[in-house]
Each structure stands twice: as C-alpha cells, then as structure tokens.
C-alpha cells in the first residue's frame, strides 16, 4: 500500500511486533530475521496480506482445547479467532499463574466473541498426566490424541470466516464527496463499488486498509474500527452526462448539470 500510495501511513505490522523486528525503510517494511521470533502477530493484522516468507505458528491442541507447550509470547486475538472458527477450539488447558499473558489474551478474545455473539473460551486446569510404572524407568504415556496445526492468517481469511460480522464502519461526508470513484478503484477488497444508481459498501469485506481515505481528494471518506453486525450501505446517486464536457459523471444532486471538474472551471476550460 505504501508503494502504491506514497501518502499511506499504514504501519500495522510495525505497531504489533513485540520485539521491534519490523522497521520502515524508504516507506517499505523490512523484517530483521535475526530479531524475528516468528510469533505471527504481523500476519494477522496486515490488511492486504503483504508479508511473505513468514508462516503462522503451529500450536498443539487436543479435541477442542489448546494444550502445552505454550509460546512465551501470547497470540493476538485475531489468531485465536481463527482457532475458534477453523478448529472449533473452546478452551485452553493451562496454569494461569504460569502463563498470565495467555490468560489476558483469552480474556480479550472472550470480549471480542461476545461482540460477535459467539460462545466464549474456558481456561481449564492442567490434567495430571499418567505414568507407566511397569518398566524400569518411569515413562510418561504419550498423548496420541494431541495434534499440531496452524490457522489461516490475515484479515481477509478472518472476514471470510466471520462474514456475518463487521470490524469496521464507513464514514462518508456526502456534501464533500465528488463521487469521482477514486475510493472504489483503490479498494482491494471491492468493499466499495459503484452501481448504476448508488455507491455501495459491504462492511463484511472491509479489512481496514484505509486506501479509500488516502486517495480521496476531499477527505470525504474514512473507515473506523467498530465491531458489529454486517451491514451494507447504499448512497443513492445519479449517473449523468455533463452539459459542458459531455463526459458521464456521478452526483448526489439529481438536478446537477455539470461534473465537478467543469464546476471548477467556470470559463469553459474543460470544454475547450
């Protein structure tokens, strides 16, 4: 996004990295491999899945429960949401005193799940593992039902998983909007689009990249973090032909006769 739109200020990956392994050089993020812990936090917040050569961490689970060993750095809520959807995880088996960061992550997850009207997670006390005393050495019985897996990363995958919910809302100031269409062309998710008679926005598709706000020449549009039920907004408009330059244009005013460019050139410069 920074390469395509020089004014873009997105640094989601930089802000979320717990060890400052990501920096912005010449407006392009750079990952310091010697510092990176492969925690995967950046993968789950990048709105356009721009990070490459990184994989989300694999975690052990049993039935519907995440189990030890746990990473020293707790996962982001966004990753736990994907565990909730992909593997139907509903609990974590751990000692909260030993893993306080994980306990806080589960608490934050339950707040988000409550907003999504989804069942929350439990924290279960660790089970006492059995031992085999039939042999000379005391050997722990292997847990054959424990598996290891990773979830799909990125807001795009999360939006598909929770398509009935939204994570952002759209704010449009209609009296400032020129209906030039720059926002619809810049939206990589096609959450914004023109229909013949309306500018439409589908909340469940929006990943919060904010490209629309960056390219808007009048700063009439922006997105804002807000979790809620999915909605689709329609801003009725009319497709007309300019009486001056004869080009087609969209307008919120059904009585408009000239496009916004010709309105800025009262002496017919656009027509010439």
Image: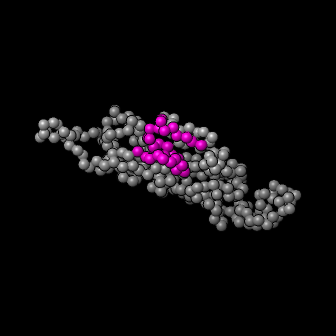
Residue 18: % across, % down? 48, 36
Task: Write the residue at 22% across / 39% down.
Answer: 128
Residue farthest top in this picture:
97
Colour setting: one colour
Q: Position of residue 199 (x, y in %)?
A: 64, 60
Residue 72: quadrant of the picture: top left
The furthest residue to the right: 267
Q: Which residues are magenta?
A: 28-57
Decide if residue 4 is on the left or right side of residue 112. right
Kindly indicate the quadrant of the structure image that contains residue 251: bottom right
Count of numbered badges drawn on the protein: 0
Q: Is residue 167 visible?
A: no
Is 81 or 114 nearer to us in this picture? Answer: 81
Q: Specify the quadrant of the image occupied by residue 138.
A: top left
* Picture residue at 70% right of the left edge, 65% below the top: 238
Query: Is residue 68 among what the camera can see?
Result: yes
Quarter of the picture holding the C terminus? bottom right
Q: Does the stretch in magenta take in 35?
A: yes
Secondary structure of the magenta portion, mostly?
Answer: loop
What residue appears at the point 60 percent right and 48 percent down from the top-left corner? Answer: 1
* Residue at left offset 62%, top offset 42%: 27
- Most distant residue in the front direction: 34
- Location of residue 175 in the rendering, given as x and y in whole percent from the top left corner: 71, 53
Q: Is residue 259 above or below residue 19?
A: below
Comparing 221 with 147, the one in front is: 147
């Amino acid at each position: 996004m920074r390469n395509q739109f020089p004014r873009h200020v997105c640094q989601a990956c930089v802000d979320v990295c717990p060890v400052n392994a990501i920096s912005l050089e010449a407006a392009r993020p750079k990952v310091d491999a010697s510092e990176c812990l492969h925690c995967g936090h950046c993968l789950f917040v990048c709105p356009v899945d721009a990070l490459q050569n990184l994989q989300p961490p694999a975690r052990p689970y049993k039935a519907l429960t995440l189990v030890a060993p746990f990473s020293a750095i707790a996962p982001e809520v966004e990753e736990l949401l994907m565990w909730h959807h992909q593997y139907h995880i509903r609990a974590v088996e751990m000692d909260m005193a030993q893993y306080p960061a994980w306990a806080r992550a589960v608490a934050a997850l339950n707040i988000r799940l409550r907003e999504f009207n989804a069942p929350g997670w439990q924290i279960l006390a660790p089970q006492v593992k059995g031992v085999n005393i039939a042999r000379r050495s005391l050997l722990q019985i292997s847990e054959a039902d424990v598996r290891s897996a990773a979830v799909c990363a990125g807001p795009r995958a999360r939006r598909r998983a929770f398509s009935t919910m939204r994570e952002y809302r759209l704010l449009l100031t209609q009296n400032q909007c020129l209906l030039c269409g720059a926002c619809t062309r810049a939206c990589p998710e096609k959450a914004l689009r023109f229909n013949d008679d309306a500018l439409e926005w589908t909340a469940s598709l929006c990943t919060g990249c904010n490209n629309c706000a960056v390219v808007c020449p009048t700063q009439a549009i922006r997105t804002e973090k807000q979790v809620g039920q999915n909605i689709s907004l329609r801003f009725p408009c009319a497709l007309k032909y300019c009486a001056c330059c004869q080009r087609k244009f969209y307008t919120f005013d059904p009585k408009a006769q000239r496009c916004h460019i010709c309105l800025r050139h009262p002496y017919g410069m656009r027509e010439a």
